[in-house]
Image (tube, rainbow, N blue to C red):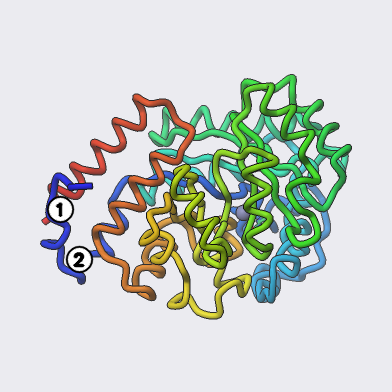
Amino acid sequence: MSLPFDTAAIPAERLPELLGIMPKAELHMHIEGSLEPELIFALAQRNGVTIPYASVEELRKAYAFTNLQSFLDIYYAGASVLLTEQDFYDMAWAYLQRAAADNVRRAEMFFDPQTHTERGVSMATVIGGLHRACVDAKTALGVDAALILCFLRHLSEESAFETLEQALPFRDQFIGVGLDSSEVGHPPEKFARVFARCRELGLHLVAHAGEEGPPAYVWSALDVLKVERIDHGVQSTKDPALMKRLAADRIPLTVCPLSNLKLCVFPQLSQHNLGQLLDAGLIATVNSDDPAYFGGYMNENFLQTFAATGLDAKQAWQLAANSFEGSFADVAAKKQWRDELAHCFASFR
Ligand code: HPA
Ligand code: ZN
């Protein structure tokens, strides 16, 4: 594609500034993964919940992960402080303020209702607080925010169906469903029927696949669940036929570089395959996943990844353009953000 500006004229030393100011969409973040240790402690105190860490510092020290499961254990413990509608609002509002500061124009936020309903917190409490923050973000922050309900794949399909049933009274307050939690041993096809039902309901469909799991899980997310995007998907480079399929069908991959680093999916950020995914023509995007746990929000993911891998200004534009294209926003909003992105690059001196 020919661009309406000359990215070669942007010197490498100015790239960090451009990465920060360029408008972008975040398509893969778990709102419970935005709970900073300070907020976990504040909410624990407010709600009289005890957590097995003596201080903010001690909790932060526990954030040394070896794989996905070692993270999930702490992530679910952190989420246990959330009880009231206001807690969910405060958590989402804190994230949306940070997103706005990183020039995120569109945020599609995952939430894990089963983590809360299993503790006796109602679906109305969870969705009510999160949705209120989304509404306020539009007017107060200029961030277009939407919710995607995730099923926990380590639980049963029956539990997913129950969760969907509980969420349907709030159908107009979330735009789609996803699949997250422990990947290996819980292939997408375990949720074939519940995803088929969600498809009938007109919900958007996404799934985590190929984070730690094999390319076969990406294939079955596409062919069995019929998802529109793959969350992570970085293992796809192991399967050339899958790479061709993802490129041909323009399936966005919501890649999370700092998450991959912290969960040891790649030993070093310099070895991340984001550049390879872009070179293969895939609609790859950059996202923060669980920013409070993995060391950074959107701009930090862009800055560290570009510094480590040597991606250039043209790839920065491509990633931001991909993020808008891959979003579930309406056509008019996408066009407005694309124009704003072009203007940002064209006027950058
Ligand atoms: N992978 C799977 N499940 C998750 C993640 C993740 O990176 N973050 C929160 N739940
Ligand atoms: Zn994720």
Q: Where does ligand 2 appear, by image quarter?
A: bottom right
Residue at image point 51% right, 66% down = 258
Residue at image point 53% right, 40% down = 108
Residue tagged by mark 2?
Answer: 14
Q: x, y (%) of residue 244?
A: 47, 54
Q: Residue furthest bottom?
A: 267
For mark 1, does the 10 Å Cα neighbourhood hold few (<14), some (14 to 19), or many (20 or more) residues? some
Do we see residue 137 in this rendering? no
Question: Which mark is on residue 246?
Answer: none
Instruction: Identify the element where label 1 is drawn.
Output: loop
Q: Which residue is more in the foreground, 324 or 248?
A: 248
How many labels, in total? 2
Left of 131 or right of it: where is 302?
left
Determine the image quadrant of residue 199: top right
Q: Distance between the residues labelled 2 and 1?
A: 9 Å
Q: x, y (%) of residue 170?
A: 69, 22
Residue at image point 39% right, 59% down = 280
Q: Is mark 1 within 8 Å of ligand 2?
A: no
173 vs 47: above or below: above
Left of 293 or right of it: where is 322?
left
Q: Is mark 2 within 8 Å of ligand 2?
A: no
Instruction: Identify the element where label 2 is drawn.
Output: helix
Question: Which mark is on residue 348?
Answer: 1
At label 1, the amino acid type is Phe
Q: Which residue is more in the foreground, 164 or 52?
A: 164
Q: Which residue is more in the foreground, 275 or 11?
A: 275
Q: Earlier in the sequence, mark 2 or mark 1?
A: 2
Residue at image point 59% right, 35% down = 147
Asked whether disc 2 touches disc 1, contact meaning CB atoms under 8 Å apart, the reply is yes
Q: x, y (%) of residue 42?
A: 68, 54
Determine the image quadrant of residue 9: bottom left
For mark 2, does the 10 Å Cα neighbourhood hold few (<14), some (14 to 19), or many (20 or more) residues? few
